[in-house]
Image: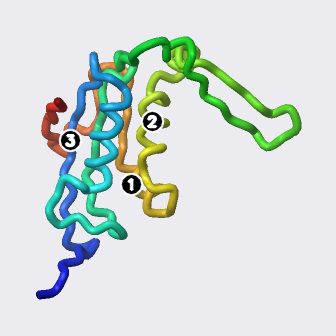
């Protein structure tokens, strides 16, 4: 018996809408990463983009547990001398609320060219509206 390996032209991508309101950030990000990767499908192949598109709405209403709102720190560096920047989750939520979910999901995807391609299938929006009605996305209920 031969092992099945999915081909890119055989994969039909679905569109899903996830409401982040009241969801815990880490649990939400793992579900989204699993859908983007295609691990929920029986024809999953690790080296092929088998995933679906995910639209996240109400990104500003995602919740975190414990003292992460003040203690979790996001760090980045511009590459220039003294270009090190730090900001807490609360500051990032005020400045760019969609980046919280984007960074959490990006860290759970492969850090390769495949991961870059999968990350483009994630669409995060602040508020309940999104411009992807033409794709007829299905509402996805997360546990």
The kind of secondary structure element at disc 3 is strand
Mark toward the viewer: 2 or 3 = 2
Mark toward the viewer: 2 or 1 = 2
Task: Decide which of 109, 55 is in the foreground and name it.
Answer: 109
CA gap, disc 2 and disc 3? 18 Å
What color scheme is it?
rainbow
The kind of secondary structure element at disc 2 is helix
Residue 22: x percent and y percent? 27, 16
29 relative to 126, above or below: below
- Circle 3 residue: 16
Disc 2 and disc 3 in contact, CB within 8 angstroms? no
In the image: residue 131, left or right of residue 74 = left
Disc 1 and disc 3 in contact, CB within 8 angstroms? no
> At x 27% / y 68%, what residue is drawn?
45
Residue 38: x percent and y percent? 25, 56
> At x 25% / y 76%, what residue is drawn?
7
Q: Residues within 10 Å of mark 1 (few under 14, many from 20)?
A: many
Q: Residue furthest front?
A: 66
Which comes before the other along the chain, label 2 or label 3? Answer: 3
Residue 134: x percent and y percent? 20, 42
Instruction: Residue 104: give its label.
Output: 2
Task: Decide which of 126, 102 is in the foreground and name it.
Answer: 102
């Amino acid at each position: 018996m031969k092992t099945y390996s999915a081909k890119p032209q055989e994969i039909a991508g679905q569109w899903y809408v996830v409401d982040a309101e009241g969801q815990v950030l880490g649990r939400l990000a793992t579900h989204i990463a699993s859908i983007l990767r295609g691990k929920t499908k029986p024809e999953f192949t690790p080296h092929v983009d088998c995933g679906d598109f995910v639209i996240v709405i109400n990104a500003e209403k995602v919740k975190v547990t414990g003292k992460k709102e003040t203690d979790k720190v996001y760090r980045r560096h511009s590459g220039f001398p003294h270009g090190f920047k730090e900001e807490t989750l609360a500051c990032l939520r005020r400045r760019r609320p969609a980046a919280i979910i984007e960074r959490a999901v990006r860290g759970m995807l492969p850090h390769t060219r495949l991961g870059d391609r999968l990350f483009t299938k994630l669409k995060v929006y602040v508020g309940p509206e999104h411009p992807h009605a033409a794709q007829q996305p299905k509402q996805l209920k997360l546990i």
